Amino acid sequence: MGFRDSYDLRQLVNLSQDFVFDAIDAALPAHPEICTCQACMLDVAALALNNVPPWYCVGKFSSLPKGVPWQRHHVSEREKDMAERARAAVETAIETVKKHPHH
């Protein structure tokens, strides 16, 4: 039996995804010209995720409280840094996909 079959991998989460997905939601209104089909949006997400550092957590630490992180009472410097990195990566990804859509 392999690793994937032996463990509950749903507990292993890359928190960078939350930051990137939130950054995409925040950025899209400023870019009404970008195609929002599934192929283009997944390309934006993939490009952005490949340009931010991973932030893996496990088990009870596998997710931040829901909602935009900076709306909580306390936000760590790491969260602020990750939010800014995600924002910048998403802006770059949007520009790339606008120039080179895969359809």
Image: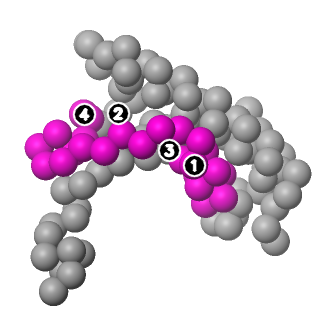
Marks 3 & 1, CB-CB < 8 Å contact: no
Whether residue 58 appears in magenta in the rendering, the answer is yes
Query: From mark 2 to mark 3, how far is it between C-alphas?
Result: 11 Å
Residue found at x 21% / y 81%: 2
- In this view of the protein, can residue 26 be seen by the observer? no
Mark 1 and mark 4: Cα distance apart in space:
24 Å
The amino acid sitting under disc 4 is Pro
Quadrant position of the N terminus in the picture = bottom left
Specify start and end residues of the magenta stretch as a single range: 41-65
Residue at the spot of label 3:
21
Q: Which of 76 and 41 is in front in this view?
A: 76
Graded by Cα atoms within 10 Å as few (under 14), some (14 to 19) or many (20 or more), the crowding at tag 3 reads some
- Which comes before the other along the chain, label 1 or label 2? 1
Label 1 or label 4, whichever lies nearer to me, is 1
Label 1 packing within 10 angstroms: few (<14), some (14-19), many (20+): few
Q: Mark 4 to mark 3: distance in Å?
A: 15 Å
Per the rendering, the mark at residue 50 is 1
Q: What element carries label 2?
A: loop
Q: Which amino acid type is shown beneath numbered disc 2?
A: Gly
Mark 1 is on which residue type? Answer: Asn
Q: In which quarter of the view is residue 11 placed?
A: bottom left
Residue tagged by mark 2? 67
Position of residue 23 in the picture relative to residue 72 (left or right): right
Q: Name the kind of residue labelled 3 in the image.
A: Phe
| Position of the C terminus by quadrant | bottom right
Cα distance between the residues tagged 1 and 2: 23 Å
Task: Write the residue at 22% across / 62% down.
Answer: 10
Identify whether 3 is placed above or below 19. below
**Residue 39 percent across, percent down from the top left:** 67, 67
